Image (cartoon, rainbow, N blue to C red):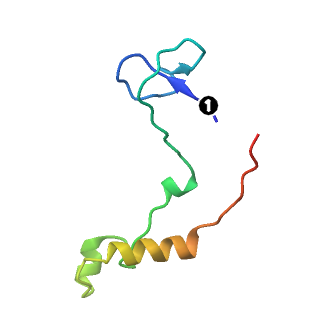
């Protein structure tokens, strides 16, 4: 895991960030995790588009909390990480 900083209020990217070193100013920080789950895309309706779902008689609406819980139940995998 890398801890980086940027100048001003820029969002960190590989090209505008640098490692945090002793002596840097302290302030607000954020953790942003990117993993395979951030790339997950599903069709909650079972169709390629909402319009296709509506054309097939689906309301085009879903229950987000139920669908999210189902996705975590079906697709999530817990992998313990050893601390360094």
Q: Which residue lies under the disc numbered 1? A: 2
Residue 61 position, x and y percent, is: 25, 77
Specify the farthest residue to the bottom: 57
Specify the farthest residue to the top: 23
Q: Is residue 54 left or right of residue 21?
A: left
In the displayed structure, would residue 32 be above or below residue 66? above
For the question of whether residue 47 can be seen, the reply is no
- As helix, strand or loop, the secondary structure at mark 1 comes to loop
Quarter of the image that includes the C terminus? top right
Residue 35 position, x and y percent, is: 57, 50
Residue 11 position, x and y percent, is: 40, 29
Residue ID at (31%, 77%): 63
Quarter of the image that includes the N terminus? top right
Front residue of 17 and 83: 83
Callout 1 environment at 10 Å: few (<14), some (14 to 19), or many (20+)? few
Quarter occupied by residue 10? top left
Residue ID at (47%, 21%): 26
How many circles with numbers are drawn on the protein? Answer: 1
For the question of whether residue 38 can be seen, the reply is yes
Residue ID at (49%, 22%): 5
Residue 73 position, x and y percent, is: 54, 75
Q: Is residue 21 left or right of residue 63?
A: right
């Amino acid at each position: 895991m890398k801890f980086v900083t940027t100048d001003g209020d820029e969002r960190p990217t590989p090209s505008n960030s640098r490692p945090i070193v002793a002596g840097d100013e302290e302030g607000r920080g954020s953790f942003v995790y990117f993993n395979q789950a951030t790339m997950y895309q599903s069709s909650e309706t079972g169709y390629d588009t909402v319009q296709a779902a509506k054309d097939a008689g689906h309301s085009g609406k879903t229950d987000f909390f139920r669908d999210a819980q189902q996705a975590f139940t079906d697709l999530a995998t817990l992998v313990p990480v050893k601390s360094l």
